[in-house]
Image: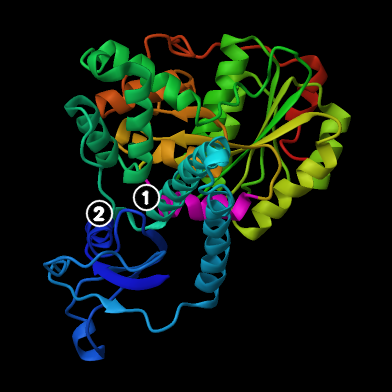
């Protein structure tokens, strides 16, 4: 087996050089970003990709030596790493097993049927092996920095333009490639010309790859508790007020609002004022145990919304304790509020802090201030967490809506937020003075437990 290391600016350039040097059956063993030159020159040189590839045997000599990729030299790998060695051993065993039937099926006139069966088995096995290698190459490409990735050539112009627009909206090129291939498979080259058909196919492709959680309180009734947490400035308090107004005014359900954010007096006063206007009970809790006891004494509200201060260790610990105390008595979900305008790495960092909490949901805000709808899809797809709601403005209760693949597809196609034709909340001229349910009225007495 021949192993060789290549340097290139993009993965496509590296793959082109690998095919020229090692042949079309070469495989990629590893890839990483490096700097050319010594310590003194590293500061002035842009990073390049170092890709290690291998082939089963030396390819046929050619009249001309392969051209260097982007004027960057390729060097022989001195010794493969232990991981590479184990990969090579596994690959060698597969290749040997591929050839075994051929050796036993060869050339006796009486064994022609056996030889044909061996050839068929070998072809099927090689096809399966090539599919696996393509998948490995795809996973390696996804692990590379987005700036080193590019859209594969050969796609119809409509699909290629869509993929480029997805990338401009924050989607990784490898993810855009997957969506583009899915659209092409669903529509065919002719149907790609019709925008309405493309939008419908995009909705179906998105629905297959991300989850939707639905509303906090489902049709089965009972009591639902929503823990709202996220980084400072993400819009948690605004989300709590919109959800409270929607469930109280639009759906006619009994609602209670609780805050753990007792350090910010302005936030507490804002929630208290909204609760008073809506006619719903409000309380400031100091600990999960205090909240649990308060719910047992006074809590017959169908929907309880809990505003957490942030995503620090104490906040995550409090949310976990709430799940432990209340989870067996009521449905309690945690909604991670994330600004849609943030970069993917910042969003993933927040999610990593809370990933161990049960029943996590993603709730994106400020969709009307961003064009990063590709980032929303990427984060939801790679984390596997379902989307719950979207916040799109400052109005209460209008500017909140249930997340859906259809809405995300509309925004991706338009490359901006599109106002929903069927909003979750109907506009209200003023918030009515709704009566406080008697069963939970005691919670309003002292505004704390």
Side (left or right) of 119 relative to 228: left
Residue 39, percent from left and from top: 26, 89
Which mark sits nearer the N-terminus, 2 or 1?
Answer: 2
Q: Residues within 10 Å of mark 2 (few under 14, many from 20)?
A: some
Displayed quadrant of residue 195: top left
3D distance between C-alphas at marks 2 and 1: 26 Å
Quadrant location, the N terminus: bottom left
Decide whether residue 279 is among the magenta residues: no
Seen at 86% across and 34% down, the residue is 328
In front: 137, or 61? 61
Asked if the magenta segment contains residue 349, the reply would be yes
Residue 183: x and y in percent read 34, 24
The quadrant where residue 414 appears: top left
The residue pinned by badge 2 equals 12
* In the image, residue 132 above or below residue 85: above
Spot occupied by residue 61 in the image (x, y as percentages of width and height): 21, 68
Give the residue furthest to the front: 109
- Compare residues 246 and 406 and report the one nearer the observer: 406
Q: Magenta span: helix, strand or loop, mainly? A: helix
Left-right relation of 435 to 223: left
* Element type where label 1 sits in the image: loop
Quick check: marks 2 and 1 in contact, CB under 8 Å? no
Is the residue 400 above or below the residue 110 in the image?
Answer: above
Q: Residue at x 57, y 33 (%)?
A: 386
Residues in magenta, as a range: 342-355
Find disc 1 in the rendering and name its residue: 343
């Amino acid at each position: 087996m021949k192993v060789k290391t290549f340097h290139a600016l993009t993965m496509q350039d590296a793959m082109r050089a690998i095919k020229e040097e090692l042949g079309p059956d070469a495989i990629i063993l590893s890839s990483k970003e490096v700097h050319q030159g010594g310590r003194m020159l590293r500061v002035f040189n842009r990073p390049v990709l170092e890709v290690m590839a291998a082939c089963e045997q030396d390819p046929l000599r050619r009249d001309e030596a392969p051209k260097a990729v982007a004027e960057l030299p390729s060097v022989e790998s001195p010794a493969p790493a232990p991981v590479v060695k184990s990969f090579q051993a596994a690959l060698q065993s597969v290749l040997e097993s591929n050839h075994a039937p051929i050796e036993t099926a060869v050339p006796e006139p009486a064994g022609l049927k056996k030889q044909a069966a061996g050839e068929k088995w070998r072809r099927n096995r090689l096809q399966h092996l090539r599919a696996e290698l393509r998948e490995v190459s795809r996973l390696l490409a996804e692990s590379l920095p987005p700036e080193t990735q590019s859209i594969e050539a050969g796609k119809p112009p409509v699909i290629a333009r869509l993929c480029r627009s997805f990338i401009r909206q924050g989607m990784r090129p490898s993810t855009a490639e997957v969506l583009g291939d899915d659209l092409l498979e669903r529509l065919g080259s002719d149907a790609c010309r019709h925008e309405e058909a493309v939008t419908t196919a995009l909705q179906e492709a998105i629905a297959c790859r991300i989850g939707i959680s639905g509303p906090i309180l489902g049709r089965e009734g009972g009591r639902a508790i929503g823990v709202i947490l996220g980084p400072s400035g993400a819009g948690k308090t605004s989300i709590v007020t919109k959800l409270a107004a929607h469930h109280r005014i639009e759906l006619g359900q009994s609602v209670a609002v609780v805050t753990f954010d007792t350090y910010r007096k302005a936030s507490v006063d804002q929630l208290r004022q909204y609760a008073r206007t809506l006619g719903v009970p409000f309380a400031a809790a100091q600990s999960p145990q205090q909240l649990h006891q308060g719910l047992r004494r006074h809590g017959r509200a169908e929907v309880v919304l809990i505003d957490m201060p942030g995503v620090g260790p104490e906040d995550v610990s409090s949310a976990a304790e709430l799940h432990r105390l209340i989870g067996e008595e009521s449905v309690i979900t945690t909604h991670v509020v994330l600004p849609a305008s943030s970069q993917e790495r910042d969003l993933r960092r927040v999610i990593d802090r809370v990933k161990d909490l049960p029943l996590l949901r993603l709730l994106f805000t400020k969709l009307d201030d961003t064009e990063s709808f590709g980032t929303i899809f990427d984060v939801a797809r790679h984390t596997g967490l379902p989307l719950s709601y979207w916040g799109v403005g400052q109005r209460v209760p209008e500017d909140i809506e249930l997340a859906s693949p259809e809405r995300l597809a509309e925004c991706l196609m338009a490359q901006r937020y599109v106002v929903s034709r069927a909003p979750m909340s109907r506009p209200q001229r003023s918030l009515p003075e709704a009566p406080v349910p008697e069963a939970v009225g005691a919670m309003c007495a002292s505004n704390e437990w």
